[in-house]
Amino acid sequence: MLKALRLAWHRWTVRRKMDRVFGRGSDPYRYDASPYEIARLEGMGKALEGRRYRKSLEVGAAEGHFTRRLAGMSEAVTALELSPVALARAQAATAGLPVTFIEVDVRVWDGAGAPFDAVVLGEVLYYLDKPLVQEEFEEALGRMAGWVAPGGRLLLAHGFADAAERSRREFYRQRFEARGFKLISETVVSAKDGDI
């Protein structure tokens, strides 16, 4: 019971934060204007290019900026988003594309449709990786690892502002490597102060 309450409280606080951010207006993270965001999305696309994916999963779709690109590489995309404000914009941005959106906390999602040929976790894990819900985070990582089809790709893309944050981001990769994943490539797309 306590575990469920902790997770519900954390989900509520993250959803509230995301709704506040996206409630400020369209593109609050400046995906279309920030040199860092443009480079990050381009780097994510390059990491997945060269293959056609039958089924892809994007966790944390936000307003659908990368979802559009992923849909161009995939026969079908399942995109998860916690914020209903962002989700509405993502649905509008991807109208007519092979994308199914689900408003859900990835920590409680059942993985319907798994396994996926590509799983994208962009700028999302650090929102879930909090001491209060660490057990739930570890459980979710295990489930996420199981959502990747044999021979599939897992893309982790997370910004960092300093050495401590970069170390934590590398920890995410190491957690998946401990579950049998192999690093194919790692790229830092931007390291400009004030741009991450």
Image: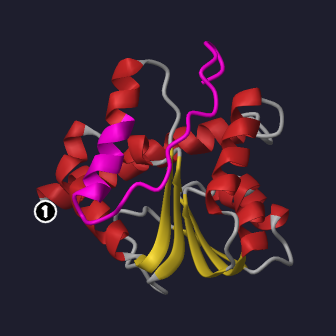
Identify the amino acid type marked 1.
Met
* Quadrant location of the C terminus in the rendered image: top right
144 relative to 130, above or below? below
Residue 39: % across, % down: 72, 37
**How many numbered discs?**
1
Residue 122: % across, % down: 54, 50
Q: Secondary structure at mark 1?
A: loop
Label 1 crowd bin: few (<14), some (14–19), many (20+), radius 10 Å: few
Residue 114: % across, % down: 45, 84
Q: Closer to the camera, 80 or 176?
A: 176
Q: Closer to the camera, 95 or 190?
A: 190
103 relative to 60, above or below? below
Answer with the quarter of the image where residue 164 lies.
Answer: top left
Q: Residue at x 49, y 87 (%)?
A: 113
- Does 25 sit left or right of 194 as displayed? right
Q: Is residue 85 visible?
A: no
Answer with the quarter of the image where residue 92 lies.
Answer: bottom right
Residue assigned mark 1: 1
Q: Residue at x 40, y 54 (%)?
A: 183
Q: Is residue 47 magenta?
A: no
- Does 139 sit left or right of 24 as displayed? left
The range drawn in magenta is 169-196
Q: Is residue 170 magenta?
A: yes
127 relative to 69, above or below? above
Answer with the quarter of the image where residue 118 lies.
Answer: bottom right
Q: Main secondary structure of the magenta part?
A: loop
Residue 148: % across, % down: 42, 75
145 relative to 28, above or below? below
